Image (spheres, rainbow, N blue to C red):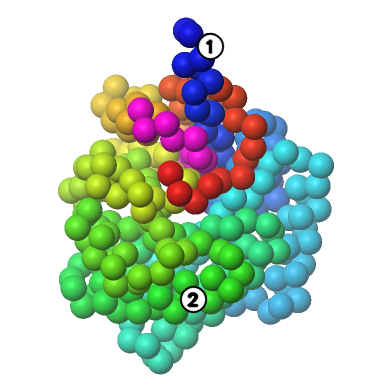
Amino acid sequence: MDEKLKSSFPSPVFGVAAWKLPGTQIQSIRFASSRRLSALHLDLGKGELSSTELSDEHQNIEQELRGESLAITAITINRLNDIGLICPAESERYKQCQTLIREGVLLSVKLGCSLLCIPSFRKSLMRSESDLRLTAGLLSDAADFADQFNITLATENSLSSSGNLKLLDMVERDNFKILMDSYNPFLFGVDPLCLINDLWPFLCDQIHIKNGRDGGMGNQSLDSAESQTGSFLKEIKKRKFSGTLILENNYREGIDFDQDLDFVRSHFKDTAKATTSKAILAP
């Protein structure tokens, strides 16, 4: 290949979602380091930590990362899926969600990452205009708090292109983006390639990569015969994506991580090697 073409844009950097690995978050850091990954997404966990407990967690993770090239590039608050973001302002649930999000922002600051992911599945799944409006109200307030610390908020959801554009319009904050996933949209009748085409300017530069079967998430290797992950990776490569790809298959249940990583890396082997693990928040 022509060297000029090869170096026309840097390769993405690669990472993994800690909650999809066996063991503790500290063990996930060790696993990621052993695979020479550049990025790790952490889950806030149960939340509702006191400031002392949050500080202890930060110190343990920070100590484990010392001397490593690995970076925590995002915090995710998966517990919000089971609390429900769809609630009126001033309700107890609204306050509970905002408390968790604020803890996520503060942990992001302490760990030096600039992206906080807010998932909208299960009890937070948006099915109507009213759901969109209530979720947008909560996310607008959360984005305002996050902005004080230069943190970007990213929604990961089940919406179509038009639904996501409505949500973006309702939230109306510069530090609010969309976290793309290579497989989740299929479960809700949405083509991920259509989302890429329609929402590209609004996507954060970190993407979750997973596969699935039988209505499940992350329960199929990325290179399976019926997988469409390859088409997804080819599309973002065509668009010169050079951010962070986070593997999110369920590696606690027997999926081979190294096989998945080799598959993803193979799609970018002819691009220039990335020089940093810091994600830029605009493709």
Residue 253 visible somewhere in the drawing: no
Where does the C terminus fall, quadrant-wise? top left
Query: 208 and 149: which one is in front?
Result: 149
Which residue is tagged 1? Answer: 3
What residue appears at the point 71 percent right and 78 percent down from the top-left corner?
A: 51
Q: Position of residue 10 (x, y in %)?
A: 54, 29
Residue 19 visible somewhere in the drawing: yes
Counting residues from the start of the chain, the first of labels 2 and 1 encountered is: 1
What residue appears at the point 75 percent right and 47 percent down from the top-left corner?
A: 65
Q: Which residues are magenta?
A: 238-249
Q: Position of residue 131 (x, y in %)?
A: 25, 74
Q: Amino acid at mark 1?
A: Glu
Q: Label 1 crowding class (10 Å Cα cut-off): few <14, some 14-19, many 20+?
A: few
In this picture, residue 184 sits left or right of residue 72? left
Q: Residue furthest bottom?
A: 90
Q: Secondary structure at mark 2?
A: helix
In this picture, residue 103 sits left or right of residue 176? right
Which residue is tagged 2? Answer: 144
Q: Position of residue 154 (x, y in %)?
A: 44, 60
Vertical arrangement, residue 136 with respect to residue 187, above or below: below
What residue appears at the point 31 percent right and 64 percent down from the top-left corner?
A: 168
* Residue 246 located within the stretch drawn in magenta: yes
Q: Label 2 crowding class (10 Å Cα cut-off): few <14, some 14-19, many 20+?
A: some
Q: Amino acid at mark 2?
A: Asp
Query: 242 and 37: which one is in front?
Result: 242
Q: Secondary structure at mark 1?
A: helix
Vertical arrangement, residue 14 with respect to residue 180, above or below: above
